[in-house]
Image: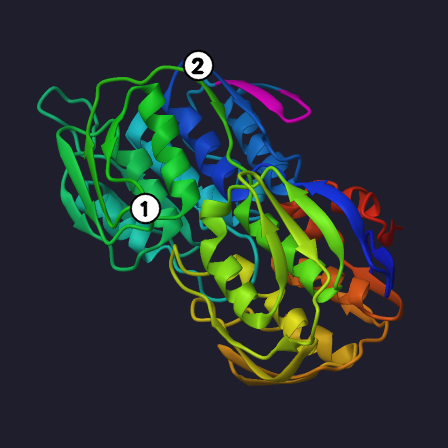
Amino acid sequence: MDGEKFIIRGGKKLSGEIRVQGSKNAALPVLAATLLVQETCSLSNIPLIRDVGTILEIFKSLGSKITWTSGDLTIDNSDISNFAPQSDYVRLLRGSVLLLGPLLARFGEVLMPYPGGDAIGARSIDSHLEGFRALGADVSVGEDHFLKIKAPRLASGKPKLIGAKIVLSESSVTTTENLMLAAVLAEGETRLRLCAAEPHVQNLALFLNKMGAKINGAGTPSIDIKGVVRLKGVEHKIISDSDEAMNLTLLGAASRSDFYIRDINPDFLEAGIQKLKEIGVALEIGNDFLRLKPPSSIYQSFKIQSGLYPKLLTDQIPPFSVLATQAQGTSLIHEWMYEGRLGYINELIKMGANAVIMDPHRALIVGPTPFHGAELKSLDVRAGMTSIIAALVAEGESILYDAFNIDRGFEKLDERLRKLGADITRM
C-alpha cells in the first residue's frame, strides 16, 4: 500500500491531557461564508487538517488571498470573479458542496462538478438542489455530473435569488447550511423548515449574523432569514470539535485510561455522556473539560444508534464499536444515516473482535474480547480514528495504512496522542 502509515504499539494506559482542535465541520461552512463578502475576514481556531487545506486550494484557484499561521487565518475574497471552482479539488472534498450557496448568492451563477469525499454511502445532494430551485434558481446537471446553477433575474436585470418557504426533504446539516448561505443575500424572506440543529449550524448562523445577516432560529428545526443587500468582514473563532471530543472520550474509556480532555463544550456532548454513564464509564465533567477515570467494574453491553442532534451524531458512533468489544454481553451498533459506513467492523474483526455485520446499517458485537495487533486500513476519517483506538487497546503492534484519511479530519493526531503516552509513529 502506498502513502504514509502509522505503527502503533498498544496495551498501555494513557495519562495527561489533550486539547480538542477547532471543529472541521464548523470551519468548512464558515470558510464558505467568507465568499459572500468583498472584505477581509479573520478566523481563529482553524484546525490544521487536510480537508481545510483542500478547500483553501479551491479558494486560491478562485482568486482568494489567504494568510494561514497556525490556527489563525485571514482571507480576502475581494478580487474573486470566478464562479467555477477547480474540479480536481472539488472532487476530493465532500464539503466543497458548501461553495454552491455563497457563489450562487454572490455571482448569480455557479459551475461545479459533484463533490467528492468519504465513500460512506450515496450521500445525495438532491436536497441542496431542491432548495436552490425553491429560491428561483435554474439547476441543470450534465452527463459528466457537472452542476450549472443560475439565479433568476430581477426586473433590473440583476441575477438574485428570491426568498421562499422551504421544507427540507431531509434534516441535512450541509443542506441547512447551504440554504442559509444562499438566502442571506436573497430578495425578501426565506423560511427553512425541518432544519438540522447541530452545533456547527449554530456557529455558522452566529458568524453570518456578525457579518450583518438577519437569521433567527438556528439550533431549532425552523430558521427564518431576512435577505440583506451586503455583508461585512468580521473576526470569528471556530468552536471546538465535539466529534473529536467524543472520539477521544471513547479512546480513554476503551483503554481504561485516566486523562483530561480540554477545550470542550459539554453541552454539545450530552447524549454521548449519558450513554457512557449507562455503560459504566467513569467521568468527571467541568465547564470546559472532561476527565476519564479507570472503571471500577466491567462495562455493560449497550444498544446505540446515530441520529439528528441533540442525539448522538453519525461521526461519533464508530468508536463505540471498540468500547463494545470491551463490554460484557452483546451490543448493537445501528448506523441509521449511511449505509456504507460499517466497513470498520471488518478491521476490528482482524484484531479479534467477535462481531458480525447484520445488514448495511447494523452490527452486533459480543464482548469482552482481547485485541491483538493487525494490519489495518483507514477507510475514512472516522473509521481511521476507530482503528487507532482499537490499536491502542490491543496488545502488540498494529500497522494502520492510509494515514492521509486521519490527516483529513484530525490535526497532528499522532503528535497529540504521544503526549498522552501513546506509542504511535508515522512512517
Q: CA distance from mark 2 to mark 1?
A: 26 Å
Task: Give the colouring mode of the picture.
Answer: rainbow
Q: Nearer the viewer, residue 397 or 28?
A: 397
Residue hosting label 1: 176
265 w.r.t. 120: above or below: above
Residue hosting label 2: 78
Quarter of image, res 100: top left
Residue located at (38% from left, 50% from top): 173
Image coordinates for residue 95, horizontal then vertical, percent: 49, 45
Magenta extent: 68-76
Q: Is residue 313 visible?
A: no
Residue located at (50% from left, 49% from top): 94
Q: Is residue 70 magenta?
A: yes
Q: Amino acid at mark 1?
A: Thr
How dense is the environment of label 1, judged by Cα within 10 Å: few (below 14), some, or many (20 and up)?
A: many
66 w.r.t. 33: above or below: above
Quarter of image, res 261: top right
Image coordinates for residue 16, horizontal then vertical, percent: 78, 44
Q: Nearer the viewer, residue 167 or 122?
A: 167
Could you tell me which secondary element the residue under label 2 belongs to? loop
Q: Amino acid at mark 2?
A: Ser
Q: Is residue 285 magenta?
A: no
- Which label was assigned to residue 118? none
Could you tell me which secondary element the residue under label 1 belongs to? helix
Q: Nearer the viewer, residue 30 or 62?
A: 30
Quarter of the figure with the N terminus: bottom right
Q: Nearer the viewer, residue 151 or 343?
A: 343
